[in-house]
Amino acid sequence: MYRIEKAAKTAENIFEFWIHAPHVARNARAGQFLVLRIDEHGERIPLTVSGVDGDAVRVVFMAVGKTTTQLARMAAGDAIRDVAGPLGKPTDVKDWGTCVVIGGGVGIACTPIIARELKAAGNTVIGIIGARNAGLLLLEDEMREACDELVVCTDDGSKGYHGFPADILKKLLAERTIDAIWIIGPAIMMKITSGVSKSFGVKTFVSLNPIMVDGTGMCGSCRVTVGGETRFACVDGPEFDAHEVDFDELMQRQRIYVDQERASLERFHEHECRCGREDA
Ligand SMILES: Cc1cc2nc3c(=O)[nH]c(=O)nc-3n(C[C@H](O)[C@H](O)[C@H](O)COP(=O)(O)OP(=O)(O)OC[C@H]3O[C@@H](n4cnc5c(N)ncnc54)[C@H](O)[C@@H]3O)c2cc1C
Ligand code: FES
């Protein structure tokens, strides 16, 4: 069992948990993830390792469906049945020169750990974080500390630049020499933003988030097409060369189980209501 050491709601529908998981904490590198199962009946879900403190790992997640909603209901002191990891290949950290690390929405969760490792390897790191509105911006202070420069954007202009990270990236690429870029966020945001860097020919990585089950290369559910070849995001990624990724296929495969996912969340809410009535 894995004890939740701290649990907090940090924004609308977004939660930050520190989980006691020494084997993950001691070995995790930037870009890697863990797979957790809340209880013996639960499904396995992948979450990025967003931070490490001693024997605890941080996950930052959005409650979007049954398992993440159930997780969000848990509190410090509760225990999670399984935590496997670290999984996936770490970020390609080396002395690139000047790097840009971009996070969109809950994808910002992955960015401080990547920015910190790139900086420690001697790079100049420019961060760009974007969210729909100011209330949904995550880890801004941490990113400010991890990066040499940070640009904040919101879709509605409630904080920072009024617009998308892609606009800032375009401006940066036109004005300065950038050697490598990381983009982590919703698939559509990664597609559009990496389209900008493609036109400038700058090496760009994205962290893909297909549906995963085992996280160990056995089930094939996380397959993605990169450079015309089938790759398994859990073992070959999750970071890939953005300019080779078939984003349209990724987005289509992310929606495969949408009806079942909706039904599962409805059953969970009905169960919660019944339990609430029985407790009353
Ligand atoms: C490598 C990786 C790292 C991730 N890191 C984070 C993170 O740090 N924070 C965060 O909020 N989310 C992260 N995700 C997405 C997260 O795993 C899904 O939001 C979660 O599995 C949804 O489960 P659910 O039961 O709550 O929702 P569901 O209702 O089951 O699904 C909601 C949506 O989430 C996606 N999803 C569902 N099941 C899975 C699954 N087993 N694997 C991946 N995606 C799934 C689908 O696109 C689906 O439409 C990551 C995904 C991957 C692949
Ligand atoms: S999650 Fe099963 S092969 Fe990747």
Image (spheres, rainbow, N blue to C red):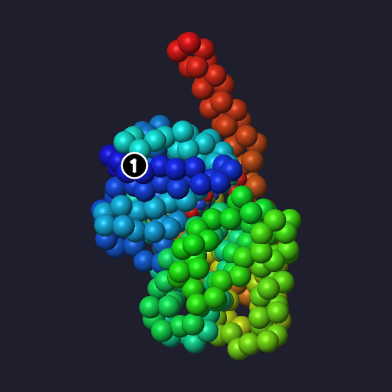
Q: Position of residue 228 (x, y in %)?
A: 61, 71
Q: Is residue 29 left or right of 70 when viewed as pictured?
A: left
Residue at 46 percent across and 33 percent down: it is 73
136 vs 166, nearest the viewer: 136
Image vertical order of residue 93 relative to residue 2, above or below: below
Q: Residue at x 66, y 75 (%)?
A: 169
Q: Amino acid at mark 1?
A: Ile
Give whichever of 86, 79 is nearer the camera.
79
Residue 275's spot in the image, x, y percent? Answer: 48, 17
- Mark 1 neighbour class, 10 Å CA radius: few under 14, some 14 to 19, many 20 or more: many
Label 1, on which residue? 4
The one of 87 and 158 positioned closer to us in this rendering: 158
Asked if residue 218 can be seen in this view, the reply is no
Q: Position of residue 214 (x, y in %)?
A: 42, 49
Residue 152 position in % (x across, y down): 62, 65
Q: Quadrant of the N terminus?
A: top left
Name the image quarter holding residue 251.
bottom right
Q: Residue at x 34, y 59 (%)?
A: 52
Identify the element where label 1 is drawn. strand
Tell me which residue sits at (49%, 82%) in the image.
124
Number of disc labels: 1
- Mark 1 beta carbon near ligand 1 (under 8 Å): no
Q: Can residue 141 be seen from the camera position used here? A: yes
